[in-house]
Amino acid sequence: MNPFSSRPLAEIPDGGTTGVVMPHEAAWEHVTGQALYTDDLPYRSANVLHAWPLQVFAAHAHIDSIDTSKAEAMPGVVRVLTALDVPGLNDYGDIGDEILFPNEVLYHGQPVAWVLAESLEEARLATDAIAIAYTELPSIITAQEAIAAGQFQGPRATLQRGDADAALANAPHRISGGIDIQGQEHFYLETQASFATVDESGQVFIQSSTQAPSHTQEVAARVLGISSSQVTVQCLRMGGGFGGKETNANAFASVAAMGAVLTGRPVSLRLNRTQDLTMTGKRGGFHATWEAGLDDDGHILSYKAVLTADGGFSVDLSPAVVSRALCHVDNAYYLPNVHVIGQIARTNKTSNTAFRGFGAPSGMIVTEDLLGQAATKLGLGEEEIRRRNFYAPGQSTPYEQVVSQAERMVDIWDKLKKSSDYDARLLDVAAFNTAHQHVKRGLAITPVKFGVSFNKPFLNQAGALVLVYRDGSVLINHGGTEMGQGLHTKMLQVAATALGLPLRRVRLAPTRTDKVPNTSATSASTGSDLNGGAVKNACELILDRLAPVAAGMLGVHANDVRITRGVVNGLGTEKCTTWEELIETAYFQRVSLSATGYYRTEGLYFDSSTYKGNAFKYYARGAAVAEVEVDGYTGAYTTRQVDLLHDVGSSLSPLIDLGQVEGAFIQGVGWLTQEDLRWDTSDGPNRGKLLTQAASTYKLPSFSELPQVFNVDLYVHGETTDDGGSVYGSKAVGEPPLMLSIAVREALRAAAAAFGEPGHQVELPSPATPEAVYWALDKARRMVSDPALAAD
């Protein structure tokens, strides 16, 4: 038996650095400006060309002709790239529906050509000289228009268990509704950027702000008509990604690489903010209708829904988004009879894509909307109806996966209610509302159960390369990308813990496809699980080789070797040596000091045709309590207090995890209450134009929207936190906390309802902007004098 690699994945060695509170590994570089991003690199090179797109501002059009001759003659212009210049395949998608240089424009602002010039300004001016003629075609802008026209794309999915129709017919109480769930712009600080060079052997090197270097490599190679081994992609770091650089980065990297190959010069491509907003995909909106049957105690007996995702002009990742939405309609609740359909609308908008949480937040909101309205209809407290529907131990999801650690949801719920003083504050809110006519408060508590793994089992794998040098220093390469979320920090802690070294002995190299190939995207909250498992495996393979060397030095059996904080000890002996001495000895004994690690998540299977299987390795859970105050004259609101309790298992890096919980929550609040994407849906000349294409028109959360009191705690359980296979017992934290923000939306709805009579549930759009809140509370007030409105 190998003494080190046979350790369980969750076992934490003595003296390990996981769980140690430490800042982000590049925090100092971030705040001092020393951290390099993709767009910093061109200024360190010579003879760089800059790319600027020719966008067509029509929602749907056929390109009749493009004449680039005048543009090519302008000062500074080196080349104009069109479809005729593509060496390989003119497509950056995976199924042939995303043309890099299209002859049919499918959304307002789609690029059809790129100018390469000595300066960005010269490239910009040259695009105005390109003569282009096109014929506008009919367009579909909203999901509702697509539904009416029968315009769908991709697979249609069905999640089913039991007999939902029969259970609905026999249910004592029936309730139905619908909700339009708006999308969300990623609005990362760093826009899409790529920088491509070609060396003397023809090797293409792309520096890209991408979450998926291997996928970017594959797409660029396909466009160039060369093998993947001739393309290397590196990602130093990203200034945010949130899913927006999982597939969207591929087109821009391919254009830069194509320009570098055709001109022989370095090419920089970096979008400005307006270009980024108009040319990249977003969180897709959903149009949902639902119907449910409940018993007298509020238990859901039947659940039926149709979820229509707005996919935009192409499929992209929308099938996976819909899949995750369907697999999360249950959230933390047991649904005995279910029939949910998921489908993708085709619209003339940018192709919607991955976003933190994928489709899970949209699926959860539909069910939370149902429970909120059911509570009022049945005269139950919203906290109580949610608790009554929680999964019990041994119960399974509609896709037939047993819900592990189901009892933790109740434990988290009870602990949060106690720490937030929920029951007493609920009475205080009621008293406040009675005493105030034009200002009302709302209090809500909501749960989150989020499955962690990629929807497609084959993506759940990762590699790592760990190098130990003769001086004892260690260099780590792994396939995950750093977008500010602290993945590199956690990987340093994993490596130091696995090797038994202080953190100062371990360094991390940028993510590159020629060091770790065939990697999955850093998304789906799997970055730490997958890459951490691979890094740990590589480190332990090296330790297995070192154990016999250390055993010989100490006079003990190899199984009795221990390494803690850089000191090598043996059980049963007082002799010891240093890590550095061990490495030097191993080198002279010709022991390999590097290893390729690999990890794959075991136990996953999922049949997308039946929607049955073990879709996730484990579940991450949390709960949120939110209290808001709403002005009855304007609908403006203040978040008075938020209390969050979230389960991250045995935290790899507590400070990083706390930051992730806080950031995800605030981003979710932005999505649900402020960030209102608007397109021109008129029949005028700007039909299909994104109207919210700047920070001045697209409202992002700021300091003023932070809760006045913001309490965030990581859940601690008395027993082992391992859930069957995550590195050092940790749990994913990137996406799950975003859905804690649903509590704010439910609190706003409760506050709006307080302006009316008890027993009337208020419908609230998403996002619940102050305007939307005002119209909701105004209807609640008017129902007091006109009860007929309640049925409207």
Image (cartoon, rainbow, N blue to C red):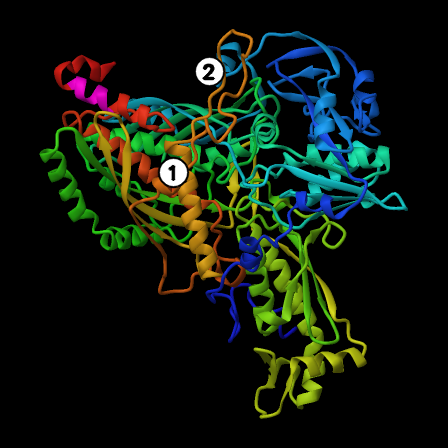
Nearest the eye: 41 or 532: 41
Sequence order check: which comes first, mark 1 or mark 2?
A: 2
Q: Residue furthest right?
A: 201
**Tag on residue 144?**
2
139 up-or-down from 530: above or below: above
Q: What whole-number distance in Å separates the C-alpha atoms at marks 1 and 2?
A: 25 Å
Q: Name the residue under label 1.
A: 669
Question: What percent of the width, then of the height, locates residue 579?
Answer: 66, 80
Q: Is residue 211 left or right of residue 665?
A: right
Q: Give the range drawn in magenta.
A: 777-783
Which quadrant: the N terminus?
bottom right
Residue at image coords 35%, 65%: 718
Question: What percent of the width, then of the height, locates residue 219?
Answer: 73, 36
**Which quadrant of the structure image shows residue 293?**
top left
Q: Residue furthest front?
A: 75
Question: What percent of the width, then of the height, locates residue 158?
Answer: 49, 28
Three-letter amino acid code at disc 1?
A: Val
**SS at mark 2 in the image:** helix
Nearest the eye: 2 or 57: 57
Three-letter amino acid code at disc 2?
A: Gln
- Whether residue 423 appears in this view of the structure is yes
Residue at image coords 59%, 26%: 351
Nearest the eye: 699 or 144: 699
Nearest the eye: 13 or 333: 13
